[in-house]
Amino acid sequence: MKKTKNGCCFKGCNITSSKLLVYIDDGTNVYALCPLHLPFYLEKDEQYRDFLCPLNSTRVPIPCILSKEKHYTKYYTTYENGKKIDVSLCSHHLQNLLTHQLSSSEYRILKTQFGTFFDISDEFYDY
Ligand SMILES: [Zn+2]
Ligand SMILES: [Zn+2]
């Protein structure tokens, strides 16, 4: 079966709603992930790697918005009420965003620039 651009890239997952998906683009691969399968991307265990079937990236990485780190940055892209949120983050800050462990200053930088979106919502932060 051919993977469509809007579907979760986890093998066998049928979630295609862009409202639910988060896109991680490392400049080589694009991973579209639903909330259920996002943890598998973060999971370091190699056994899960085979389940992720990314698309090819066409983007050029830019420095992390929070630390200006230039190496191994990734784009985090999601849609909030039809608005595209597109953030460049280093591995460290991407991990902290996805696991909801940003510092209050990092949280505020993102909120000021992009407004509220799911991963920085009140559910996870009370800064
Ligand atoms: Zn999925
Ligand atoms: Zn960073």
Image (cartoon, rainbow, N blue to C red):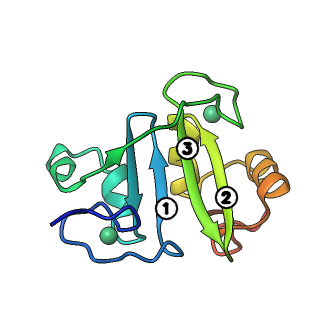
Return the disc, 1 or 3, that comes first in the chain's sequence. Answer: 1
Screen quadrant of the C terminus: bottom right
**68 in relation to 123, above or below:** above
Q: CA distance from mark 2 to mark 3?
A: 10 Å
For ligand 1, the image quadrant comes to bottom left
Q: Left or right: where does residue 122 sit relative to residue 50?
A: right
Above or below: residue 15 compared with residue 125:
below
Q: Which mark is residue 85?
A: 2
Residue 107 place in picture, x, y as percent: 74, 53
Mark 1, residue position:
22
The residue shown at (70%, 66%) is: 125
The amino acid type found where label 2 is placed reads Ile
Q: CA distance from mark 1 to mark 2?
A: 10 Å
Amino acid carrying mark 3 in the image:
Tyr
Viewed as shown, does residue 5 lie left or right of 92? left
Q: Is residue 32 above or below residue 109?
A: below
